[in-house]
Amino acid sequence: MSGIVSISIQRFFVIYLLLSIVLVIMKKSNIDQTRLLFVASMRMTVQLVIAGFILTYILKNPHPAFTIGYLVAMIAFAIHRVLSKNKELNLRFKIAIGASLSVSGIAVVLFFVIAIVNQNIFNPQYTIPLSGMISGNAMTGVNLGTKTFREIVDSERSKIETLLNFGAKPQHILLPFVNQALETAILPTLNSMVGMGIVSLPGMMTGQILSGTLPTTAILYQIAIMIAICTVVCLSVFGSLYFGYQTLYNNRNQINYLL
């Protein structure tokens, strides 16, 4: 199999013409998100170009400090993104989210790189891209799970207060909401796994095939990474919500909600 075909800068910029289709549809549908479309596409481009230069340097000059630094930066950014969308959460809830994202992400990455790929954890060629996929999906899952949990609690406040007045324990009231939010957060990953290989060829597998990797090898990597992603999403969301919801009530069985 031949290696991947390089894309010239001139041809690369042609891809931005596709955004004009998105812009036309948004205008026709009265969706006032033109600025967001522009900012998102430009920010993505700048961030990925910067990441490309940094990764090129790291791969040419491999050092444990670079790998650890990049991994810490990815996890820190993931935590920042989740917390920035949930500013009203109390401090202990935020700590639960940060700890869950960090511990679950690092644990799954370590297991994947050492036990599955059989590589040194400080090898940037494997640790950095795998960490990116795992941390990114964990961030999305925790965001969705936290959002769902907050919306349920807000919509069920009157019911919660009624149950409290009848003597129900806060944990008995809130735990079903945690379970419901966890199910909502993990469903997109499960649905993606159901259609994978028939409806879609996932990004990691496609990238490996484009680079000349045998499809059989790419398949094994893709199956492994999807199981790892499913696990980290489940762990990070469960940890965030299970330990987080316990910060919402006190010893007198009073619920402070999310403030």
Image (spheres, grey):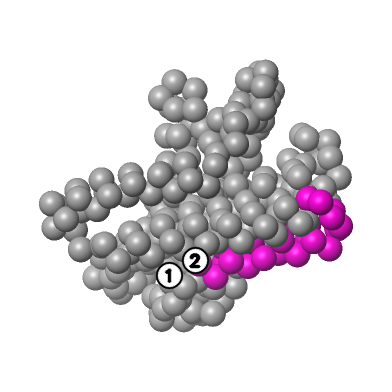
Q: For this view, does 130 lie left or right of residue 31?
A: right
> Label 1 sits on what residue type?
Lys
Q: Does 127 sit above or below residue 73?
A: above
Pick whichever, 172 or 87, lies toward us: 87
Question: What residue span does the magenta drawing correspond to?
Answer: 59-82
Residue 193 in view of the camera: yes
**Distance between the Cα atoms at labels 2 and 1?**
5 Å
Q: Is residue 54 left or right of residue 155?
A: right
Per the image, the residue denoted by label 1 is 85
Do the residues under discs 2 and 1 have CB atoms within 8 angstroms?
Answer: yes
Q: Quadrant of the N terminus?
A: top right
Q: Given the image, on which type of amino acid does mark 2 rest?
A: Val
By secondary structure, the bulk of the magenta-drawn segment is best described as: helix
Q: Nearer the viewer, residue 111 or 237?
A: 111
Residue 12 x %, y %: 48, 44
Q: Which residue is painted at 63% across and 20% down in the image?
A: 215
| Above or below: residue 203 compared with residue 94 | above
What residue is disc 2 on? Answer: 82
Q: Quadrant of residue 168?
A: bottom left
Left or right of 9 on screen, residue 25? left
Q: Is residue 201 magenta?
A: no
- As helix, strand or loop, the secondary structure at mark 2 comes to helix
Q: Is residue 150 above or below residue 6?
A: below
Check disc 1 and report its element: helix, strand or loop. Answer: loop
